[in-house]
Amino acid sequence: MTLKSIIMTASLLLMSQLSFALSLDDAQAKGLLGENASGYLEMTPRGNEEAKTLMTDINAKRKEKYQSIAIKQKTDLKSIEKIAGEKITAKLKTGEFYKDANGQWHKK
């Protein structure tokens, strides 16, 4: 194999991996991730490592946003998380999962 063909093969493999990356919509539709009452994603019993990676990334971004809102509104983070959880859960599509404040999973 020439260097050019190795580079092309590696590029194609990389692009194919990116096209198969799990999206939040896919993860929720497949029942891998659900929302919890605190405004964060949580793995359902069906979850896998790819879903866990996605969850960790999105939850970090959500927490940063929630903290920013809490600072602006001069309130505690827990209050913002609770409100976010309520809003997110209300917007879930039929068939998506959420965990209530008592820790029970439900399917919308």
Image: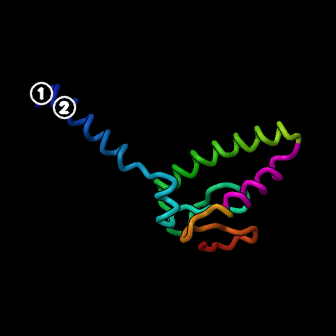
| Residue type of the residue flagged with mark 2 | Ile
Q: Identify the residue at horizontal 60%, vertical 72% (top origin).
A: 108
Label 2: few (<14), some or many (≥20) within 10 Å?
A: few
Q: Residue 41: x percent and y percent?
A: 62, 56
Question: In terms of depth relative to the viewer, which is nearer, 17 or 24?
Answer: 24
- Residue 96 vertical placement versus 80 (above, below): below
Q: Which residues are magenta?
A: 75-89
Tell me where residue 7 sits by quadrant. Answer: top left
Overall secondary structure of the magenta section:
helix
> Which element carries disc 2, helix, strand or loop?
helix
Which residue is label 1 attached to? 2
84 left or right, relative to 48: right
Q: Identify the residue at horizontal 57%, vertical 45% (top origin).
A: 57
Tell me where residue 12 sits by quadrant. Answer: top left
Which residue is label 2 attached to? 6
Q: Identify the residue at horizontal 68%, vertical 63% (top origin).
A: 90
Farthest right residue in view:
74
Question: In terms of depth relative to the viewer, which is nearer, 45 or 16?
Answer: 16
Quadrant of the image containing the N terminus: top left
75 left or right, relative to 90: right
Q: Residue 48: x percent and y percent?
A: 47, 60
Circles 2 and 1, Cβ within 8 Å, touching? The answer is yes
Farthest top residue in view:
3
> Which element carries disc 1, helix, strand or loop?
loop
Farthest left residue in view:
1
Label 1: few (<14), some or many (≥20) within 10 Å?
A: few
Question: In terms of depth relative to the viewer, which is nearer, 83 or 53?
Answer: 83
Question: In terms of depth relative to the viewer, which is nearer, 87 or 77?
Answer: 87
